Amino acid sequence: MRTGACAPAWRRPRPPAPATPRMGGAIAPGRCATFSQFERTGTTERNRLVDRDVAVLLGDAANGDHRAWESLVDRLSPLLWSVARGYRLSQPDAEDVIHTAWMRLLERLDRIEDPARVGSWLATTVRHECLRLLRRQGRIVLTGEAELDSGASDQPTPEAALLRAERSTLLAHAFAQLPQRCQQLLRMLAVRASYEEVAGALDMPVGAIGPTRGRCLQRLRQRLAAGGISVSRLAD
Amino acid sequence: MRDSPEDERLLDELRRVLDRTDPMPEQVTRAARESYTWRTVDAELAALAWDSDADRPLASVRGTGDARLLTFDAEGLRFDLEISGSGRDRRLVGQLVPAQPGEVELRQRSGLARTVQADDAGRFAIADLEPGPLSLCCRRPGAAVVATEWFLP
């Protein structure tokens, strides 16, 4: 089991195993692996372990430890990517917004009130910057409750990329058909955001997340089933 | 609040699909990791106090020719900024308040600092801004270093 800056603290303790990813490709030396490699733990347990670890990393980074900063960036950037892309920002815009959020944290490294919740602090900062940018681009329309434009952007959607595996294609298409709110939520849950991080990123009360999650997964399953029926290959 | 195993499996599958259709580019983490060197421990932070963009009606789109006005405030020093142009032709015109000379450093993604001098009236200008977030840092003799919050112009 890998130790050091890239070790996922929230992984359940297991006998040492070779660090071979389940997905194709080797881990580049010095790089942290993607989330795809690791097993899913329950939400509550993951939060406890990750939050404590994140607080320690933040403290170390504030004390001048560059590697702790890098670990923090590696650990929380996938979450921020899910937020920015959930808001339909283009790839360059998403990169800029996420970089801005990290710099905002850097300038306040020793002044963060709740280090264990820095994930949700960052997710909230990304939301604010996304909305600011979308407003500048004229992509926000106020209709009583603020909504994001549902029209197709002139960027190809991430979900439009072609995949070899049929089931993956079905899932990608089914996901793309969900209301944007569901896509935003499920993107974050897919990278194991905590409910607090979701609340900050989507401006959603924590109590609403569980029920919304259930409804969105239900809709995803329905669309998967509907997509499966229209596929012409035989299901044995 | 434990997730059901079926939900967990579906979310795992979704993550794998998103990893392939929308992977996070390596430069996202690289840019942030490398930016640690920008940390200025003793700088006073000038917070965003006013943004002309925040005042516009939501549905209006700013024309590419319109300048954006921003004010950053710290105790004892204010930055009044005007950013105009678009793409790689953006420029920044600034004013230190109260009016005074000082060294103004532009900090951007690339890691290379560019420094200009504010004149006696506190005015300075910087052309050819890179895309992406930026911060200004002001050094004056006998005064604390003051840095604006990082922002995305």
Image (cartoon, rainbow, N blue to C red):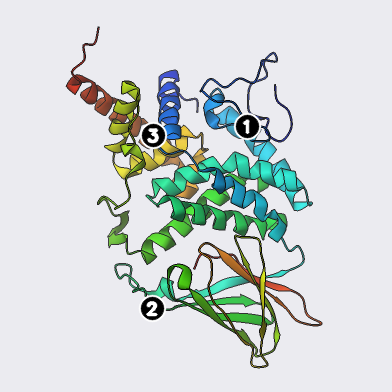
Give above or below for A60 relative to A139.
Answer: above
The residue depicted at 76 percent of the width and 62 percent of the height is B41
Give, as a three-letter code, the residue at label 1: Ala
Kind of residue sitting beneath label 2:
Asp
Quadrant for residue B7, please give it: top left
Q: Residues within 10 Å of mark 1 (few under 14, many from 20)?
A: few
Q: Is residue A136 left or right of residue A197?
A: left
Provide residue A72's location: percent of width, then percent of height: 65, 43
Do pointers 3 and 2 mark residues of a single chain? no
The chain under label 2 reads B
**Could you tell me which secondary element the residue under label 1 belongs to?**
loop
Q: Closer to the observer: label 3 or label 1?
A: 1
- The residue beneath circle 3 is A213
Residue at the (60%, 20%) spot, across then down: A20
Q: Mark 3: few, some, or many residues within 10 Å (few <14, many ≥20)?
A: some
Task: Indicate the chain on which mark 1 is placed.
Answer: A
Q: Percent x, y for residue A164?
A: 35, 25
**What mark, if any, has residue A28 been given in the picture?**
1
Q: Quadrant of residue B20?
A: top left
| Secondary element type, mark 2 | loop
Residue A142 spot, x, y in % from top left = 29, 61
Q: Position of residue B83 (x, y in %)?
A: 49, 76
> With A36 as the anchor, is A60 left or right in this view?
right
Q: CA distance from mark 3 to mark 1?
A: 34 Å
Question: Outermost residue toward the bottom?
Answer: B121
Which numbered circle lies on residue B66?
A: 2
Q: CA distance from mark 1 to mark 2?
A: 45 Å
The answer to whether residue A113 of the structure is visible from this angle is: no
Q: Nearer the viewer, mark 3 or mark 2?
A: 2
Secondary element under disc 3, as helix, strand or loop, is helix
Is A214 located above or below residue B80 in the figure? above
